[in-house]
Amino acid sequence: MDRLALHVNGTVQGDPQFVVEGLANLEQAGPQHLSFVARKKLRLQAEESKAGALLVWPELSADLKCHCILVDDPYLAYARISQLFWSARQVASGIHGTALIDHSARVPDTCRIGPQVIIESGVELGEEVELGAGCYVGRGSRIGPRSILRPRVTLYPQASVGSDCLIHSGVVLGADGFGFAPVPDGWVKIAQLGRVVIGDRVEIGANSTIDRGALEDTVIGDDVIIDNLVQIGHNAELGAGSAMAGQSGLAGSAKVGKGVLVGGQSGIGGHISIADNTQFHGQSMVNKSIKEPGVYASGIPVQPASDWRRMVARLKQLSALSDKVSELWSRAKQNKE
Amino acid sequence: MDRLALHVNGTVQGDPQFVVEGLANLEQAGPQHLSFVARKKLRLQAEESKAGALLVWPELSADLKCHCILVDDPYLAYARISQLFWSARQVASGIHGTALIDHSARVPDTCRIGPQVIIESGVELGEEVELGAGCYVGRGSRIGPRSILRPRVTLYPQASVGSDCLIHSGVVLGADGFGFAPVPDGWVKIAQLGRVVIGDRVEIGANSTIDRGALEDTVIGDDVIIDNLVQIGHNAELGAGSAMAGQSGLAGSAKVGKGVLVGGQSGIGGHISIADNTQFHGQSMVNKSIKEPGVYASGIPVQPASDWRRMVARLKQLSALSDKVSELWSRAKQNKE
Amino acid sequence: MDRLALHVNGTVQGDPQFVVEGLANLEQAGPQHLSFVARKKLRLQAEESKAGALLVWPELSADLKCHCILVDDPYLAYARISQLFWSARQVASGIHGTALIDHSARVPDTCRIGPQVIIESGVELGEEVELGAGCYVGRGSRIGPRSILRPRVTLYPQASVGSDCLIHSGVVLGADGFGFAPVPDGWVKIAQLGRVVIGDRVEIGANSTIDRGALEDTVIGDDVIIDNLVQIGHNAELGAGSAMAGQSGLAGSAKVGKGVLVGGQSGIGGHISIADNTQFHGQSMVNKSIKEPGVYASGIPVQPASDWRRMVARLKQLSALSDKVSELWSRAKQNKE
């Protein structure tokens, strides 16, 4: 346990030689586990936990009988320690015999290239890049050192991925943006000539899609985290440290600042800009620029369907209702006078 | 036709030797087709249909001139008969020459393994499992008897799929949950050490994603049906017999009971729980636990954009309006007194 | 530049020999670029642009010092010219050695078939079809002349794609529709026996899914454009020239007319019909048929979370509020009388 404490700059209270066999939640932890107290409210649960050891704030540790690692931020400490019980690597060293690599591609010896991977001409991989089975890396693309692509990720030509990224299965980077000029009998496609450029330390969830730009690039900043089934349109910019939860979307040419948190199933409209550190609840509809950072929301929470039906009916009459109130108000005012 | 009637415990009215060449809807059926009367309201359409034969309630059959199979639930009978006109199998027996199977994997002779399938170390497949072209089964995963994966399904390591499941193309099971601890300059990844565990007789639609758990498992119960592009977050639980329609989402650590029906594009928030047999209309936002089963909704139906704009403006003034009404109300009350 | 002008039926103002090295936006264009004035409002930006040449309306060109191509619709002209700077082809001529093609499939010599492509029995490809790496074309499917599938597109059996289509990576066409008959202990699957039929000149964005029909077909008209992560259910019909933006959905058996525009994250319910030329803003919920073409919306724009919380509370009291106003109104009327 002292090794783990050292890893998170924590102080041991109890037996430094205690052997942690695994991590578990407070409720499920047994005497062989290390657990963590994520919030101070959980004091009681911490005392009742059967965990052999706990990551905990110093001020909460007094009454705990288990071994403790005292830290300033137990949740962060748990995050750091969780990585010790995990191996990011899933592909064997070297290049699998079934991978197809163009002779002009640069693939350092330290890369791990899985079966059925296809690497087209002019691709450049950094040191220790891992490509899971069946990844497709289009011509002229570039992936920075230590980035990992899980099986079946697709990079269109000229995509650029930074270092230390983790990109999950089914992700498509650099497909054509949704750009068309209307004509009477349909649409004329606007060739999408820009690129998609992903920063460093970015994680992208399964089956998410980020389109290439029309003329300029689509740009994802450093330290961005993106959940599953997220859509990012062409020319969009997503600032460093931002997070987009599952099934949220960022429409074309939207400019999102740094440290912005986007709730699940939210949508940010095209051609608008969002201030740094703005937060959106789930299912938000953002159709205007946000200049003032803060927390925003618009989703309507569920009600029993009968109440909901009544509310919807009333909503349609809201203007009429409002007009009535105005008239009553002005009459009341006259009466007073 | 008598063979079909037997298959659904129905009674033939008309010619038992009538030959059914195919199934069709009431409107499109011809004299060679078997059709069905899905609801009792459709009596008139049934009488006007050109179908050669019909699955129908006994009480509706009196005036019908075509051959009939009388059953208690025509829609269910149609479902059962539809399967006779279909073959779930799409892959030839045996193991395709281009499949890559680790020597430590258990693959019974009765399995059907398509081209370019990759099966990693320690995988265990049940009898008669079918893997479509290009499926990737990560190390230590397990798939129960008779389950079918369509082409290009991805299972991360340690995924567990029950028996008799049908998983459609592009599905990703067991990708990392969206778990990160915030730090001033970005995020520290929480290693996702749990598994994804799918029950028996589960169907999962194309390009849906179900993440592995952080510490405990993400658990999908038996007899669950999931449509396309659905997202299920880490540690979530979805009870037996539940259904999630297209593009709906279940956030991390949500606990959904049995027999819950989730409408399309609905979102269930994280860390909440939903009672058995609850139903949600499409586009519902569920951000609090539901303890009382029933039907719930929150989506606002479309209106002409001009009405909508007025409504949105009024909505923003709703508090002011409400305050005005309160004042008018109290004045009126005073006047009365 | 005269060649480009000819391509868009434009008139050169300035030097016809001016060499255009690339395209760029007004703000980013340099002296080597051709740019375009998309809207007449952008007159000032056009004058300030450093672009070497501009696509512009004749009436806006008077004060411009750069070279100009005068056209009636600069945005459309930009679309047409953008294609000259682009190559749709990404796969080498011929059939890659790792492709697996059933002997019964028809693959003209003019096709371009990438590595690891799988073409099952009875497939018919038109002339000059391009299949990117790892595409899977199920048995009996058909793809019309000059259509292009990017890497890792999946066609289930019997899918039909028209000519001149562009289908992006991760798309799944013809997976089973979401059809089940409920039984007390779960669901009985309805075999999905219909096909998916895609018209000519259709573009489908990355990771979108279009299900096959239950009995009849799911039909996408000519000249339809579909963005990323869009879901289209079984038996749905989408009329010619329609457009569906990112993450929108069309539920089963919905019938959408021609020229319909569906905003991002909108959902159109099952079994309803939508008039030609209807438009829906983003995040619309369409749960009833629309007979009158026009612009429709229902999404609520974000507000600061404190305002939003108040609004949500008031919304739940909207019926009570409305009742109060009605009573005040009738009293006021009595007072008047």
Image (cartoon, coloured by chain):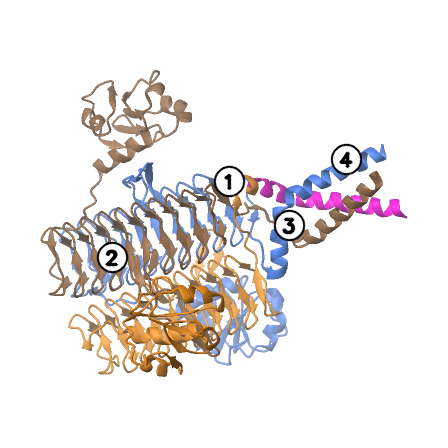
Chain colours: A orange, B brown, C blue
Give, as a three-letter code, the residue at label 1: Lys
Residue B34 to residue A318: above or below: above
The numbered mark, 3 or 4, whose residue comes first in the sequence reads 3
- Check disc 4 and report the residue beneath it: C330
- Check disc 2 and report the residue beneath it: B160
**C142 or A175: nearer the eye?**
A175
The segment highlighted magenta reads A309-337
Distance between the alpha carbons at the discs numbered 2 and 1: 40 Å
User: Who's the residue at 54% across and 75% down the image?
Assistant: C27
Residue A202 to residue C163: above or below: below
Q: Are marks 2 and 3 on the same chain?
A: no
- Check disc 1 and report the residue beneath it: C288
The numbered mark, 1 or 4, whose residue comes first in the sequence reads 1
Give, as a three-letter code, the residue at label 4: Ser
Asked if the stretch drawn in magenta spans residue A154, the answer is no
Could you say where residue B196 lies in the image, as x and y percent from the top left? 30, 59
**A146 or C252: nearer the eye?**
A146
Q: Are marks 1 and 4 on the same chain?
A: yes
Label total for image: 4
**C25 or B114: nearer the eye?**
B114
Secondary structure beneath label 2: strand
Select label 3 or label 1 by which is in front.
3
- Check disc 3 and report the residue beneath it: C314
